[in-house]
């Protein structure tokens, strides 16, 4: 039997300097720094880069020891910038220059939460759309007026640069970057081991402080409706039909659904159908029309249109990139790394 092909590890550079947040460093390390190849996740080569090799103090008595200089960014497939404890912390000049050069080489760069301020210092967000924590958007606008600050996204992409909202949205972005480069199954495996959702729908509008617009009973009812829709994706669903199941008028249902999830019922349904189709394309050899039928798109043409809009690819090309037939026995998860 021919030896199984093992892909070269994707090279991820964590950019560090005094003032970066320990939590964001931990998120980056948890997503890309843990070996989960026994669960079908591709290998990653995560390196902690800095201007010099001296340990970097982090809040809470922690420290980070770099294992590569900023020169390693020339080899990276992806560069990730953590957020900051003080969002106006000036990044060292070598860091800013290294980020500018990396962007000029078309290396993808992602910033978690307040890491957007670092990219803005480097001038990389001038004339581009960016997001940060909802409580910091005004500060980002005030100090970097050339940045187009989007107020309510969880994360967004502009010209090979990714930015994300607050703490948990950094996890969302990291998993999304895994999903877009290595497939939904890899992202889902990492999410399961982190005991988090592989993706969240909506925007950070759902987290901005405001009076609670509905009762806990309403929230429970909406959760039950979403669970029903997920287990009946192949069926056609309308707002009126889902509202009737919740015992609400369509207008009231749509308003409460938006307040709870940050998105509309139909957009939420499309997102769930795309995710289900991704899994079938990765795991099975079902014909495309059958994948479309099982996930509620109705036709291959409709599924193809949604893939083009949301994933910038086609179902056929997605399958070619990420289809995988397991050829290994189940691993003993009790002895494998979480």
Image (cartoon, rainbow, N blue to C red):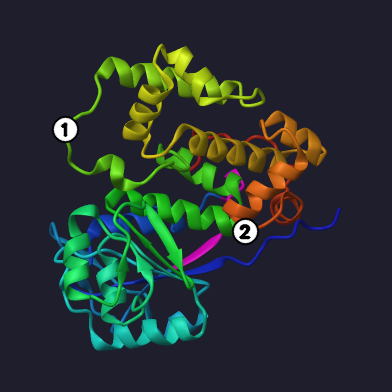
Depth check, front residue: 52 or 211:
211
Q: Is residue 146 above or below residue 241?
A: below
- Mark 1 surroundings: few (<14), some (14-19) or many (≥20) residues within 10 A: few
Depth check, front residue: 9 or 109:
109
The segment highlighted magenta reads 37-46
Q: Which numbered tag is attached to residue 86? A: none
Where is residue 37 drawn, in percent x and y? 58, 51
* Residue 297 shows up from this direction: yes
Q: Is residue 163 above or below residue 238?
A: below
Which circle, 1 or 2, is nearer the viewer?
1
Residue 52, quarter of picture: bottom left
Which residue is at a point 50% across and 77% down the rendered structure image?
107
Residue 85, quarter of picture: bottom left
Residue 317, quarter of picture: bottom right
Q: Determine the CA span between mark 1 and mark 2.
A: 37 Å
On the image, numbered disc 2 is attached to which residue? 312
Badge 1 marks a residue whose secondary structure is loop
Q: Is residue 319 above or below residue 120?
A: above
* Residue 335 shows up from this direction: no
Q: Is residue 233 above or below residue 106?
A: above
On the image, numbered disc 1 is attached to which residue? 211
Badge 2 marks a residue whose secondary structure is loop
Depth check, front residue: 314 or 115:
314
The mark tally for this picture is 2
Where is residue 237 drawn, in percent x and y? 58, 24
In magenta stretch: residue 38: yes
- Mark 2 surroundings: few (<14), some (14-19) or many (≥20) residues within 10 A: few
Where is residue 233 drawn, in percent x and y? 62, 26
């Amino acid at each position: 039997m021919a030896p199984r092909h093992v892909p070269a590890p994707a090279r991820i550079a964590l950019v560090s300097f005094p003032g970066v947040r320990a939590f964001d460093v931990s998120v980056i390390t948890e997503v890309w720094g843990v070996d989960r190849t026994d669960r079908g996740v591709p290998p990653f080569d995560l390196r902690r880069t800095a201007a010099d090799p001296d340990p970097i103090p982090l809040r809470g008595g922690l420290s980070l020891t770099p294992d590569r200089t900023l020169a390693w960014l020339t080899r990276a497939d992806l560069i990730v910038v953590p957020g900051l404890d003080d969002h106006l912390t000036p990044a060292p000049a070598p860091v800013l220059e290294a980020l500018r050069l990396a962007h000029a080489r078309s290396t993808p760069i992602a910033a978690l939460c307040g890491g957007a301020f670092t990219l803005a210092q480097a001038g990389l967000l001038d004339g581009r759309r960016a997001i940060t924590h909802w409580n910091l958007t005004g500060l980002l606008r005030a100090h970097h007026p050339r940045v187009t600050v989007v107020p309510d996204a969880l994360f967004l992409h502009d010209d090979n640069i990714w930015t994300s909202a607050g703490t948990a949205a950094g996890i969302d972005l990291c998993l999304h970057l895994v999903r877009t480069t290595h497939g939904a199954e890899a992202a889902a495996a990492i999410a399961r081991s982190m005991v988090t959702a592989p993706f969240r729908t909506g925007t950070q509008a759902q987290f901005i402080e405001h009076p609670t617009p509905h009762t806990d009973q309403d929230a429970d009812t909406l959760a039950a409706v979403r669970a029903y829709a997920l287990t009946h994706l192949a069926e056609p669903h309308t707002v009126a039909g889902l509202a009737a199941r919740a015992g609400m008028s369509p207008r009231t249902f749509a308003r409460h659904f938006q307040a709870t999830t940050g998105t509309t019922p139909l957009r939420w349904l499309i997102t769930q159908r795309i995710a289900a189709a991704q899994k079938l394309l990765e795991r099975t050899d079902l014909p495309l029309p059958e994948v479309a039928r099982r996930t509620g798109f109705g036709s291959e043409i409709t599924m193809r249109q949604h893939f083009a809009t949301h994933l910038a690819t086609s179902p056929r090309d997605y399958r070619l990139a990420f289809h995988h037939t397991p050829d290994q026995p189940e691993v003993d998860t009790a002895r494998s790394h979480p």
